[in-house]
Image (tube, rainbow, N blue to C red):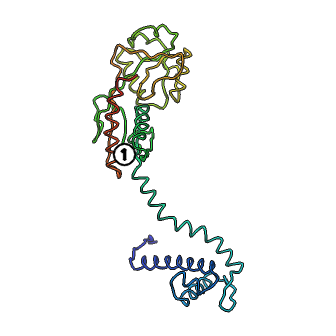
Amino acid sequence: MRSMRYVFHPARCAAEFDEVFMELLQLRYFLTAARYQHMTQAADALRIAQPALSQSIKRLEQELGVSLFDREKRRIRLNDAGRFLQQTLTPVMAALDSLPSAVREQAAQTARTIRISHPAASSLVTEGVLEYRRLHPEACFRLRKNTCAEQPDDLCVCAPCPGSFAGEGSRFLLKETFFLAAASGSPYAALPCVPLEDVKHEDFIILSDDEPARGAFLRFCREAGFSPHIACECGDPESAQRLIAAGLGVSLWPIHSWGAPRQPGLALLPVSRPDCRRDIVLICRPAENGALSEDFCRFLTSYAAQRETVL
């Protein structure tokens, strides 16, 4: 059996378009006639000849197989079928009439929307967006925590593995510090800093959905000479804060990803060794809103430089 193939015929497509256009025109003519219920007045409003309007209405009635008007000398009156069509058609045509402006508005919305993936430094990105919006209220953002490779957005804030190539268009933002998070009543809370090897026997609490932070955490533990015992995996930093403050374990806290803790009873301590920091980079990709994305790239780069040492 031969496979069916659609063959493009420009003339056929043009004819089909004309047919659809004419059908829409017929429906518009009908609504105008229904509004005036007078052929001459409706034709004047449409700026067409009265016979042309009459023929259009007749064709529509023939296609539907029903009469839409009761005719009384020079006047016409909607019958039940005509009233039903008018009531059904009015919102449909209104939606069609508003479609061009809606499409233009959608295009304008896309042009002023910056799409950002942020598998790392989520807190920094959120703070940067808030500040940028304060300066540029017209800018819109779409933030997602997915990895940069899943569905490329205009910008991506990530933490590449040490020694790896972040990609074309990447810019260094800052070095993110991991602090030791412990209960304020623990022996570590009174210390000015803590070597990571000193907590190797502690239970650790990590986030289950933050693979970049998990990878950095395991790397730091390897550099300190131990394999951590993970007692609990949570879904968000707020849950981790509560567990740590309750004394269920300790954690390494990436300050620009998880933000400053707000949970009472939790302390953040500098790690003296190894160097528990990772590079945070911004990857800028070509986008339809190139000028806007580039402006935000410059802003976020400057903003990150100011925030690097802020706890």
x, y percent for residue 233: 52, 25
Q: Residue at x 69, y 83 (%)?
A: 77
Name the foreground residue: 27 vs 6.
27
Amino acid type of the residue that numbered disc 1 sits on in the rendered structure: Asp
Which residue is depicted at the point 43% across and 76% down? 13
x and y percentages locating residue 59 in the rendered image: 58, 85
Residue 118 percent location from the top left of the image: 41, 37
Q: Relative to 205, is 92 on the left or the right? A: right
Side of 222 relative to 61 (left or right): left
Q: Relative to 207, is 149 above or below? A: below
The quarter holding residue 147 reads top left
Q: Quadrant of residue 90?
A: bottom right
* Residue extending farthest right: 80
Q: Is residue 42 left or right of residue 261?
A: right
Q: In which quarter of the view is residue 60 placed?
A: bottom right
Left or right of residue 257: residue 39: right
- Residue situated in front as seen by the camera: 299 or 58: 299
For image coordinates 36% across by 15% down, the residue present is: 224
Residue 247 spot, x, y in % from top left: 54, 14
- Could you tell me which quadrant the C terminus lies in? top left
Please rate how many residues cluster around mark 1, counting C-alpha atoms within 10 Å: few if below 14, some from 14 to 19, many from 20. Answer: many
Residue wearing tag 1: 154
In the picture shown, does residue 59 fall above or below 243?
below
Label 1 sits on a secondary structure element that is loop
Is residue 206 shown above or below 103?
above
Query: Residue placed farthest to the bottom in the image?
Result: 73
- Residue at 68%, 74% (x, y): give it: 84
Nearest the viewer among 118 and 142 is: 142
Q: How many numbered discs sit on the rendered protein? A: 1
